[in-house]
């Protein structure tokens, strides 16, 4: 499998080809000015749909226009050099109606672009309601949609997401090292998948510092990637280590073992990372961990940067694990264009529940493992 060479020019060329392929959408006689926004905001009406379990991002603010306008302004308006006016990255607990449920599990949610804390809470509400579990949000702050899109590109090509990774490493390390926790589930969306990839590679860098490299062949064996560069910064191997990452890195260096990664599962919506790969190999019949699962709408321009990008050659993305595509679907928002369609599929009444998410041919499973957690369920197998 090809890798992104660790050279500025090569990384720039790879990024440009990657973006070019992502925006190669079916124009069907419509101008790019129409189709590109459609790839993010979906078809008319998709933003106003709502169910008791999943409120779309816009529907959540209907009737509260002052809050809606303030949230929209924070998410959309990019003001250079206004970082002090923005909400800081970092974790916050969002239990919803399920505080105390499943004490042997930790569910973490990493938000995407143009997401204020209030929108992240709307997303977390949907996760809580669908899976009936409390969630800790690993908040990745927004700088407004223009700067967020640029930062997403930079995160893929020029390792510019260190602040969000450093601010959110603590809860992940704490959950993995807690002996009372049997499962750690990460739900990531959009730019949050880049942050999540860098978090995984940070764990790998910490493990590699104390023992022989875990993944020696296949997915995960190729080290150079933009997210890897972030991981090296967070773990103190490149430039000055961020102060807010020191406690988590020290704890992981002292306590984290490869077996802890075996209880980690990562589910990525609109995965746009350049490289998301396993961290360790476990067991007498070797399996890679963590479990990785990614989903992309066919005409989501952001998903086409990663999970739906070619796996080889210039402009490729290295996304390991099981992958699923929803054919013919437009839109990028988590609730409106990913969670609500899954809920629609499940309400069709098939047994066991299924979705129109099409598995890639090389998947280990034909049906997303994430569905086994719906409505408070637990997968029959601790690991596929």
Image: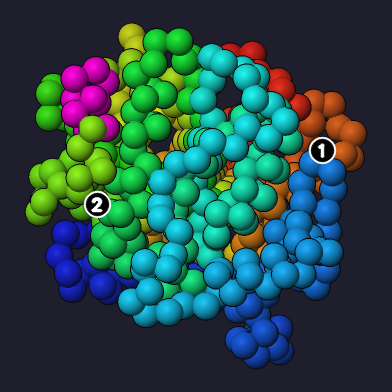
Residue 183 location in percent, x, y?
50, 20
**Would you say 336 lies left or right of 184 here?**
right
Q: How is the image coloured?
A: rainbow
Residue 21 location in percent, x, y?
47, 72
Mark 2 neighbour density, 10 Å: few (under 14) some (14–19) many (20 or more)? many
In the image, is residue 135 part of the stretch drawn in magenta? no
Please name the residue shown 10% across and 45% down the image.
Answer: 237
Q: Main secondary structure of the magenta part?
A: helix
Between 254 and 205, the residue placed more toward the observer is 254
Please name the residue shown 58% across and 51% down the image.
Answer: 120
Q: Which residue is mark 2?
A: 230
In the image, is residue 250 part of the stretch drawn in magenta? yes
Image quadrant in which you'd find residue 197: top left
**Would you say 179 lies left or right of 106 here?**
left
Residue 88 location in percent, x, y?
41, 55
Hey, which residue is sitting farthest right in the picture? 349
Q: CA distance from mark 2 to mark 1?
A: 38 Å
Q: Note whether 226 is above or below 74 in the view shown.
A: above
Please name the residue shown 38% across and 74% down the image.
Answer: 82
The residue segment tinted magenta is 248-256
**Would you say 220 lies left or right of 344 here?**
left
Image quadrant in which you'd find residue 247: top left
Check whether the beta carbons of the residues at disc 2 and disc 1 lie within 8 A of each other. no
Please name the residue shown 36% across and 25% down the image.
Answer: 174
Name the N-terminal-most of marks 2 and 1: 2
Q: Note whether 285 is above or below 3 in the view shown.
A: above
Residue 92 location in percent, x, y?
50, 40
Q: How many marks?
A: 2
Disc 2, SS: helix
Q: Which residue is mark 1?
A: 346
Mark 1 neighbour density, 10 Å: few (under 14) some (14–19) many (20 or more)? some
């Amino acid at each position: 499998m090809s890798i992104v060479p660790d050279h500025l020019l090569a990384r720039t060329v790879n990024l440009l080809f990657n973006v070019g392929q992502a925006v190669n959408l079916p124009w069907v006689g419509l101008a790019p000015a129409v189709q590109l926004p459609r790839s993010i905001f979906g078809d008319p009406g998709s933003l106003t749909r709502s169910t008791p379990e999943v409120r779309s991002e816009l529907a959540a603010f209907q009737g509260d226009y002052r809050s809606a306008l303030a949230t929209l302004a924070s998410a959309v308006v990019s003001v250079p050099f206004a970082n002090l006016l923005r909400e800081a990255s970092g974790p916050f607990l969002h239990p919803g109606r399920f505080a105390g449920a499943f004490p042997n599990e930790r569910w973490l949610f990493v938000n995407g672009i143009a997401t204020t804390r209030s929108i992240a809470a709307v997303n977390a509400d949907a996760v809580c309601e669908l899976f009936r579990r409390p969630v800790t949000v690993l908040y990745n702050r927004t700088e407004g949609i223009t700067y967020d899109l640029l930062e997403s590109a930079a995160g893929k090509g020029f390792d510019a997401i260190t602040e969000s990774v450093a601010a959110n490493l603590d809860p992940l390390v704490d959950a993995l090292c807690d002996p009372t926790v049997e499962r750690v589930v990460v739900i990531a969306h959009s730019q949050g998948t880049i942050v999540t990839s860098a978090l995984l590679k940070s764990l790998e860098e910490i493990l590699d510092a104390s023992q022989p490299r875990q993944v020696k062949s296949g997915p995960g064996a190729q080290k150079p990637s933009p997210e890897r560069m972030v991981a090296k910064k967070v773990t103190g191997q490149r430039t000055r280590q961020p102060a807010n990452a020191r406690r988590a890195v020290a704890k992981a260096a002292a306590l984290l073992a490869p077996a802890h990664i075996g209880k980690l599962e990562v589910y990525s919506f609109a995965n746009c990372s350049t490289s998301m790969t396993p961290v360790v190999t476990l067991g007498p019949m070797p399996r890679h961990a963590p479990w990785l699962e990614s989903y992309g709408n066919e005409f989501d321009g952001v998903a086409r940067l990663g999970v739906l990008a070619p796996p080889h050659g210039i402009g490729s993305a290295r996304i390991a694990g099981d992958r699923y595509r929803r054919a013919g679907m437009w839109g990028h928002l988590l609730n409106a264009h990913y969670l609500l369609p899954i809920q629609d599929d499940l309400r069709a009444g098939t047994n066991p529940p299924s979705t129109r998410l099409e598995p890639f041919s090389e998947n280990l499973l034909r049906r997303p493992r994430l569905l086994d957690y719906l409505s408070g369920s637990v997968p029959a197998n601790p690991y596929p």
